[in-house]
């Protein structure tokens, strides 16, 4: 079958399944199977696709039609210009989280020691280490399966010697201090999870999403406990839900954080909160 015809077939199938980005996903899956790039569809639409490639593509399209995330089918997701391994055990890195990484990067300097709480795939911490010099970090997560993914990503990106991944219920297994603590914790209210798109609701790990009844459980715990693990003048950075900035700022101020900042994402919604711990409460 011709390359362009197979693409059109896949696109049509995904549209019938009401996949939001049917055209994009069909193209990406075809490129994944045929080991081509985005120019192939336009420059070489007549390219022949082998029977084996066609069958593999059709199987992937069938799976994507059931709302299995594209990234779970390819096993990869790009984030901050890097390619990360992902699977059903980790939250798929999203563009909005790049805002968090970019804000932390503004305060990085040589020799900084970073804790990434609820590290998941390790994408936040490993991106920070990749784009800085002589920095080191610890990634903590309650999921042992997620930590396996994070370790694989560290090795894949050549940063295994600069990072340690720790199985920990928040700070339970942490025994050192840091210049920066960064976290994208579970923050979706429990009653909202069932309203999410199927790719998220049914395929992202629930423990990476559920922030309990008000979505603030993990912010409360991390903010209160973080003071023991931050050096004086250290900073705490959070990704937040679009309606959580006021609550998180209030919690941080109550526990002695100063110089609070709220940053918006590309859609103009509150996305990042951070502050500096100067000692005290």
Image: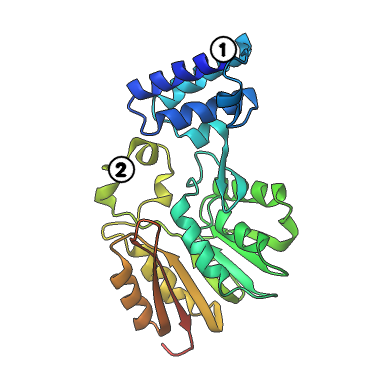
Q: 10 Å neighbourhood of mark 2: few (<14), some, or many (≥20)?
A: few
Up/down of 119 relative to 18, above or below: below
Up/down of 104 relative to 124, above or below: below
Q: Is residue 173 visible?
A: no
Q: Nearer the viewer, residue 41 or 190?
A: 41
At a point 41% along the width and 50% down the height, the residue shown is: 207
Q: Is residue 242 left or right of residue 121?
A: left
Q: 10 Å neighbourhood of mark 1: few (<14), some, or many (≥20)?
A: some
Up/down of 90 relative to 132, above or below: above
| In front: label 1 or label 2 | 1
At a point 37% along the width and 37% down the height, the residue shown is: 202
Residue 2 image label: 1
The x and y percentages for residue 127 are: 61, 58
Q: Is residue 146 visible?
A: yes
The x and y percentages for residue 200 are: 38, 41
SS category of the residue bearing label 2: loop
SS category of the residue bearing label 1: loop
Name the N-terminal-most of marks 1 and 2: 1
At a point 43% along the width and 28% down the height, the residue shown is: 23
The image quadrant where one finds the C terminus is bottom left
Q: Nearer the viewer, residue 267 or 243?
A: 267
Farthest residue to the bottom: give it.
280
Q: Is residue 12 left or right of residue 277?
A: left
The image quadrant where one finds the N terminus is top right
Residue 162 position by quadrant: bottom right
At a point 48% along the width and 74% down the height, the residue shown is: 236
The x and y percentages for residue 81 are: 60, 51
For the residues marked 1 and 2, what is the alpha-carbon distance in whole angstroms? 37 Å
The x and y percentages for residue 134 are: 73, 70
Up/down of 58 relative to 43, above or below: above
Q: According to the image, label 2 marks what residue?
A: 196
């Amino acid at each position: 079958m011709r390359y362009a015809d197979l693409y059109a077939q896949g696109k049509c199938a995904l549209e019938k399944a009401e996949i939001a980005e049917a055209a994009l996903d069909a193209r990406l899956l075809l490129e994944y199977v045929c080991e081509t790039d985005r120019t192939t569809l336009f420059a070489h639409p007549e390219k022949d696709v082998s029977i084996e490639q066609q069958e593999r593509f059709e199987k992937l399209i069938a799976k994507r039609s059931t709302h299995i995330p594209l990234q779970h089918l390819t096993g990869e997701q790009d984030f901050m210009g890097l390619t990360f391994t992902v699977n059903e055990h980790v939250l798929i890195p999203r563009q909005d989280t790049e805002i968090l990484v970019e804000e932390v990067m503004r305060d990085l300097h040589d020799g900084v020691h970073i804790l990434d709480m609820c590290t998941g795939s390790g994408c936040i911490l490993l991106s920070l280490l990749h784009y800085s010099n002589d920095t080191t970090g610890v990634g903590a997560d309650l999921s042992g399966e997620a930590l396996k993914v994070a370790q694989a990503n560290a090795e894949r990106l050549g940063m295994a010697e600069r990072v340690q991944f720790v199985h920990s219920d928040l700070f339970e297994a942490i025994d050192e201090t840091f210049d920066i603590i960064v976290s994208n914790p579970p923050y979706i209210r429990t009653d909202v999870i069932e309203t999410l798109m199927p790719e998220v609701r049914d395929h992202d790990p629930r423990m990476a999403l559920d922030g309990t009844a008000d979505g603030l459980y993990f912010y409360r715990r991390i903010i209160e406990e973080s003071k023991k693990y931050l050096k004086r003048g250290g900073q705490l950075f959070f990704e937040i839900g679009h309606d959580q900035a006021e609550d998180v700022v209030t919690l941080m101020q109550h526990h002695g954080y100063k110089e609070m900042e709220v940053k918006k994402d590309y859609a103009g919604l509150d996305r990042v909160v951070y502050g500096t711990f100067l000692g005290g409460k």
